[in-house]
Image (cartoon, rainbow, N blue to C red):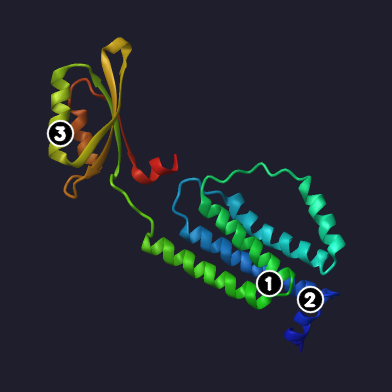
Amino acid sequence: MLDLLAVQSSTANATLITLAYTLILAFILSSVIAWTYEKTFLGLSYSRNYVQALVLSSVVAATVMQAIGDNVGRGLGMLGALSIVRFRTSFKDPRDIMFIFASLGAGIGCGVFAWGAATGGTIAFCIVAFLLSRTGLGTKHFFDGMLRFAMPNDSAPRLAVEKILHSDLKTFILITMREVDGGARVDVAYQVRLRKSKPAAEVLAELSKIEGISDIQFMMQDATTQM
């Protein structure tokens, strides 16, 4: 039976079996990270390719570290080779960058035979990611969403709209107003907070009864945050 501690101590000249252990462990750890990302994702722009990239990046990082080993010359050569690669992918969510770093860290840890550190770090990262997604740390919504519609530029529909907003909404604030159709109509947008007894569908239904109102839209706060 293979003594794993002995395998970990032979970092200078990695054998085929240690390389296999390294790549398999990197694949397993990065798969756990990718699965954690999938289960804790709360945004809108989910990408299957990104999840697969989490797994692939860890395997690549482990392979690169195996190729470099303890050779400084190889490390400088690898750095020069990678410097000519231009990565055009941009990340809108800082959380996605952290998952990439976690996957790369697991791969690097496996590549330098720090299997305990790679495994422990991956488990700790995944546990923290699950805890943060379940506790909702950082959530601070003053409003439930944005209400937008167009109405005639007249006092009668404006008073009817204000009456509905005051009676059906807990809080609302006007954020934009612009004239359209040569000043005949007004396009308005409100940040709103709903009452528990009045869901958004009922508010939209009452607004649609006002004569002349059109293009009624309601976007939840999570959606407007992502846009």
Specify the amino acid type for callout 2: Thr
Q: Position of residue 64 (x, y in %)?
A: 77, 61
Work out which residue is located at the far bottom of the displayed protein and give it. 1
- Residue 226 occupies quadrant: top left
| x then y, percent, for residue 137 | 38, 60
Q: CA distance from mark 1 to mark 2?
A: 11 Å
Residue drawn at 65 percent across, 67 percent down? 106
Question: Which quadrant of the figure has residue 59?
Answer: bottom right
Mark-to-mark CA distance, 2 and 3? 70 Å
Q: Identify the mark nearer the N-term, 1 or 3.
A: 1
User: Which residue has dot 1 on it?
Assistant: 25
Specify few, some or many for label 3: CA neighbours under 10 Å numbering under 14, 14-19, or 20 or more.
some
Q: Residue 207, how many percent across, how many down?
A: 20, 31
Tell me the kind of residue under disc 1: Leu
Quarter of the image that includes the C terminus: top left
> Would you name the residue on which mark 3 appears?
164
Residue that badge 2 annotates: 18
Q: How many marks?
A: 3
- Give the Cα distance between marks 1 and 3: 60 Å
**Residue shown at 12%/31% (left/top)?**
163
- Between residues 210 and 175, which one lies in front from this camera angle? 175
- Element carrying mark 3: helix
Above or below, comparing residue 35 to residue 47 in the picture? below
* Other residues around mark 1 within 10 Å, as few (<14) / some (14–19) / many (≥20): many
> Could you tell me if the residues under marks 2 and 3 are in contact, i.e. CB atoms within 8 Å?
no
- Point out the tag, 2 or 3, that comes first from the N-terminus: 2
